[in-house]
Image (cartoon, rainbow, N blue to C red):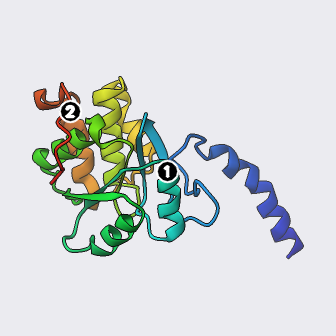
Amino acid sequence: MRALNALIASWLPIFTLSTPSFAGTIREHPAHGMSIVRFAELDSGVYKGSKPKTDADFAFLKSKHIKYILQLRFLPLLSRAEQKRARRYGISLISVYINASPKSPSEKHVNRILEILHDRCYRPIYFHCDIGRDRSSLIATLYQVYFKGLAPEDAWQKMKGFGFKDSWDLSGLKKYLVKHPTPPASLAVPSHTCAPAR
């Protein structure tokens, strides 16, 4: 047993050195007692991570002055509990469908999500998918390419850095990233109408 403990101790520095150090890439909680993981700030007032589940999660988002939660949903009718809890904290929930499968998501859905994130009327905003890993990573990477100057050739590494799981069942998300290196014209100028999102 002592030999096994010594072997494990000798491996720990290797694993520690290989862990990415920037926010949103590792399964750390941004504050004590929270369930949110992969939390990152992409822009002033634009945050990403996993689905908030506890009162501590919503209290943390409220401490960041979050006005809107943008839920990247895959299955319908699963947002009622989150909507109810968000409302208690004075936060509005916007739910937009986005596919996560071997088939690429719809451009219409992706562009709608990015349009909301780019519109300063909805800030501060927090967006998430269920575990804050795959759909959130695609959207976060596209946001950085389209609006923050990330080079398209660096996008795949950034998406993996956000935690994307490169597997066949999620290959449609990777395909979308590769096929959309530049923003559509509709995203060139953000809307500032501040009309309620649907």
Is residue 132 positioned above or below 3 on the image? above
Identify the image quadrant of residue 186.
Answer: top left
* CA distance separating discs 2 and 1: 26 Å
Which residue corresponds to mark 1? Answer: 39
Farthest residue, direction right: 2
- Foreground: disc 2 or disc 1: 2
> Quick one: label 2, few (<14), some, or many (20+) residues within 10 Å?
few
Image x and y of residue 70, in percent:
30, 54
**Number of numbered discs on residues:** 2
Quarter of the figure that contains the C terminus: bottom left
What residue sits 10% from the left and 46% below the top? 108
Q: Amino acid at mark 1?
A: Phe
What residue sits 25% from the left and 53% below the top? 171
Quarter of the figure that contains the N terminus: bottom right
What residue sits 35% from the left and 32% below the top? 144
Which residue corresponds to mark 2? Answer: 192
What residue sits 31% from the left and 68% below the top? 83
Residue 94, labelled with which disc?
Answer: none
